[in-house]
Image (cartoon, helix red, strand yellow):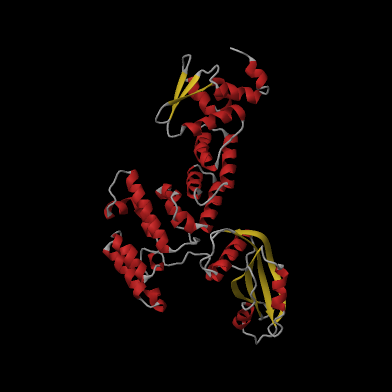
Amino acid sequence: MSGNWRDQNPTGREQFHYVFQNNLFSDVRFLVGNEQTPVYSHSFVLKVRSAVFEKILEKLHGPIQEIVIDGVTISGFNRFIQFLYTDHLEASAEEALEILPLAKKYRVSALSKQCVTLLADGIQENNAASIYNIARDLKEIELEQKALQFIQDNASQVFTGKDFLILTNDNLCQLLKMDELDIKEITLFNALMQWANVECGRHTLRSTPKQLRMVIKDALYLIRFPLMSLDEFNTDVVSKQILNEKEIKEVTKYLETNIGEREFVKPTLFNCMGRNLLHEDHIDLSKTDDDTHKRLSKHAILKSNPSPSAVPLIVTSLILEIEPKSETIDLEELKAEILKIKKFGLYWGASNAVELPNGKRKLRISFAADTRRPYGAGTVVEAVLDLENYVSQVLVRSFKDEIVVRI
């Protein structure tokens, strides 16, 4: 065997990588996946990098020790083993989803940390559910919370995508319990039915109403049917034959009742509370954190244009506190005057009245301004101040720049 490869790979990391890639001096053979594809390695490296492998190899004997690895692709396993030799991970977020369970199983903490970082930085609509699924199952709390926040802010895209279909029933239920989802309830129900059809396939069951309900389990009671319209309920829900007669009667009675009297006919099994944080009643203008500004900006854009472009917008977000010129000025009238201020890329958002200790009231209102605008955010404040018959002073309560809003 020529020693030139050592000269061509002068560092220890390069040499170990070369040895692994070319199956030199190996004494361990992994049989990977359904095809039992062989991957060769070295017991010394495995024992040094993983206490789990050390225990496994102590029980094996012979010149070549074989270990069977199921439930992983050859590509994912190769990247996992390669890290043990080089401390270097070359992988996409999708590949990290496969590598992280291996790193956790074999207790390679350095690799686990790199995978978590890669996944946290790579959350998108097409992988958020998978990342949440694995983070929760592996008890990666910070990653789970980050994925959860993304799903909360992008619920419509996540629940209508294919990635959502891989969720376990338990993790699906955790998402459906959330009060803070920006999505219509009928869309959630249709997503649940699509998930149930796939789940039936995973268990080789026919997708009959009885079998669908069986795999859905208690997730059905997390759908808030009372939030739907009567037409949606009759057309898209009752026709699926998933609910029993009692459940249908309770929800129908609630939806047919006048809004002012619904309090007395609430269904016993289904939650009636709205869950869309982008609804103005659910937005807290006293908060000034980044998540609140992102939610305020999204609300403002959708309020001005219910069908905006799918291209992400970058905006400046402000919360103003406006003192009326006199106590006799109606805050709704003041708000109406402010909303007449129109500029390119200016989106007026949520507002509410603020009661002061001295009995006076102020108007708190938010707006988002597209960063492509040809004016400064201060120009909007000046335009409000120019309402001399209505406004005494304006305070910028909070300001956040470069907010990325995906609709």
How far across and down, in percent of the image, does residue 64 sit?
Answer: 47, 16
Q: Residue at x 58, y 21 (%)?
A: 19
Is residue 64 placed above or below 254 in the rendered structure? Answer: above
How far across and down, in percent of the image, does residue 205 sit?
Answer: 29, 46
Q: Which of the pair 194/311 is nearer the observer?
A: 311
> Where, by quadrant of the figure, is residue 184 drawn?
bottom left
Which quarter shows the C terminus? bottom right
Q: Residue furthest top?
A: 1
> Where, by quadrant of the figure, is residue 248 drawn?
bottom left
Q: Which of the pair 341/26 is nearer the observer?
A: 341
Which quarter shows the N terminus? top right
Q: How many marks?
A: 0
Q: Residue at x 52, y 53 (%)?
A: 148
How far across and down, in percent of the image, does residue 373 sit?
Answer: 67, 66
| Horizontal arrangement in the rendering, residue 250 relative to residue 296 (left or right) | left
How far across and down, in percent of the image, does residue 12 sit?
Answer: 66, 23
| Horizontal arrangement in the rendering, residue 218 relative to residue 181 (left or right) | left
Is residue 110 placed above or below 347 in the rendered structure? Answer: above
Is residue 397 placed above or below 7 in the rendered structure? Answer: below
Is residue 264 placed above or below 84 in the rendered structure? Answer: below
Q: Residue at x 63, y 18 (%)?
A: 5
For the question of whether residue 146 can be seen, the reply is: yes
For the question of whether residue 267 can be seen, the reply is: no
| Horizontal arrangement in the rendering, residue 321 relative to residue 263 (left or right) | right
> Where, by quadrant of the figure, is residue 388 drawn?
bottom right
Q: Which of the pair 256/374 is nearer the observer?
A: 374
Q: Residue at x 58, y 24 (%)?
A: 48
